Amino acid sequence: MNTNYKRNLVTCALPYANGPIHIGHLAGVYVPADIYVRYLRMRGRETLFVCGSDEHGVPITIKARKEGCTPQDIVDKYHGIIKNSFADFGIKFDIYSRTSSKIHYKTASEFFKKLYDEGKFVERESEQYYDEEAKCFLADRYIVGTCSKCGAEGAYGDQCEKCGSTLSPDELIDPHSAISGAKPVKKMTKHWYLPLDEYEPWLKEWILEGHKEWKSNVYGQCKSWLDGGLQPRAVSRDLDWGVPVPVEGAEGKVLYVWFDAPIGYISNTIELLPDEWEKWWKSKETKLVHFIGKDNIVFHCIVFPSMLKAYGDGYILPDNVPANEFLNLEGEKISTSQNWAVWLHEYLEDFPGQQDVLRYALCANAPETKDNDFTWKEFQTRNNSELVAIFGNFVNRAVVLTHKYFNGEVPANAKPEQIDTETLSQIPDIRKAIEDNLENYKFREALKEAMNLARLGNKYLADTEPWKVGQSDLERTASILNVSLQICANLTIAFAPFLPFSVEKLNHILNVAVLDSALAWDELGKDGILPVGHKLNKAELLFAKIEDAQVEAQIAKLNATKVANEAAAAEKAAQEEPVIAPAKAECTFDEFQAMDIRTATVLEAERVPKTDKLLKLTIDTGLDTRTIVSGIAEYYTPEEMVGKQICILANLQPRKIRGIESKGMILMAQQEDGKMRIVSPEEKLINGACIG
């Protein structure tokens, strides 16, 4: 691991331009990245901060179809909203561009073409889902159905938003096209694949041996992928929106978004610095850090590095990928499709001038090691009990008292006491703790240390009581306020990476614009940052109290969203009233008694080769161990079946299915739409228990 870096290249995950930014994005990626960049620049380290909109994802095309417009209309709309929201929130990228730009199309095309010409891809024909009514191939996100993991309706072919499980279209129950509603069929198509398996030995050495310092969630996920064995991954897609595959015979195909998007970091750098971009991407003196959410770990730690390795030509690899976990909202998973989110642009409208309150709340509760929860009540408490009552209260009292006793000028330390020295001596230790945490991407702990500096000042004032001392001993009061103002000046430095708007206001109050060195990080913890006689401006409140009514309005908005979602789900369920199959002809009691229906447990399960629907099950009936072949593969995976207790017709005459003798039949419930579920005992019974 190189530690002799001259510059820092910091990237943030490219947000999808199919909707606004919400607090989950901010807490997971953009707030910690902005804090880190501000800190690096305060340390005088050359830094480039790169981001942009990801405009070729399938969700964008789905959104365009729903709204009856073009994908370009969608990305133009949301690119503007996202870019402006970031700027208004104080997140200052050196460039925030987009993957629909001409320079990106050129860069991504050339990247693909070089790998293609050098034979770095594998060309394959495979069966892909196809919508015969819409006459197009379906990306995974265009296929919806019931989640096989949790039973939730409306799961996508790549993920269930309800339970968060990663899926494939084959795992969906009752899959259908999101475009036409038709049941998709499989059709042959040709695509190019990046053979990740060929890079597996190199990745194991680079990550598992070379980057043990990575966060445990990042390292662990990488290890899990590598231990499971990597497979070739398609780099092209049958779609009409994206960067066209730049080779003959690839009409109607575009670069897969996961391949296209990370190249955006490079193309955005080229757009900003056309003559100097290579020093940022091809110099061993550059430290590359990716800030992402946990759902992007595999792409930034395994896929993109493999792309760069395949390309060669001196491209550097990430030094670190400090991915965060997810942030939930009021106890539930944030869902953009369900509008269960706090949108940044709406927050900025509802809480004007209070960007730093949200920055503080999100950093203080950052999901660095596990999923965390955002609640409006905690947001209010963070502001009122910490920012207002500790930080703001300390600064206001120190400045107001200085104006009262010393005409707003920094007084001399005329009568120092031991408590003064002991208090100021703690600042270098706080500085070191902030630095150590920021250097190791522990932003929550770093913010806690910065707040400890405000707590130190608050306690010092409470212990020394200058409002009382000033009535009889002005020299001692001068010393107390000198120390207090030095702590205020240190706060402008310690909080600058975290709360830029509040620090700007504090700089004005302290009138530090005339002190060029006051905001330099190296001044943090030094003696006498504010010289004696320095004139302060009038005091003003750094933070405003957030009232109950403001928070209740936000909670009411979320409750209204929940009610609307429940009503929509109920309406959909009513429209999908199931059709009940007609009753069959009567049977006699003797005929029923002839059926031997028993409980059994599945011991082993595997797919029957060259079939889509058949599973071969080895079961324990209590009487024997036997094999049953059942057409349930489209509803259950082999892994789901192992250990499941089922009911079987045990005395059904054996028959051969695909050359396998099947002895019995599983009891299933089937609706008219074809959906089938296994009938299982309500509670665990012994194998062989008779049903009748």
Image: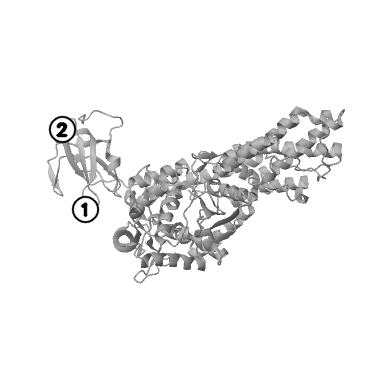
390 left or right of 576? right
475 left or right of 324? right
Q: Secondary structure at mark 1?
A: loop
List x then y, in percent, for residue 553. 62, 42
Residue 156 seen anywhere in this rendered image of the structure = no
Residue 437 vs residue 601, the one in the foreground: 437
Amino acid type shown at disc 1: Lys
Residue 190 vs residue 595, the one in the foreground: 190
Tag nearer the camera, 1 or 2 = 1
Residue 190 picture quarter:
bottom left
List x then y, in percent, for residue 152. 39, 44
Which labelled disc corresponds to residue 299? none
Label 1 vs 2, first from the N-terminus: 1
Using a 10 Å C-alpha cutoff, classify the residue at mark 2 as few (fewer than 14 neighbours), some (14 to 19) or many (20 or more): few
Q: Which residue is mark 2?
A: 624
List x then y, in percent, for residue 270. 53, 64
- Residue at image x 28%, y 29%? 684
- Residue at image x 68%, y 36%? 427
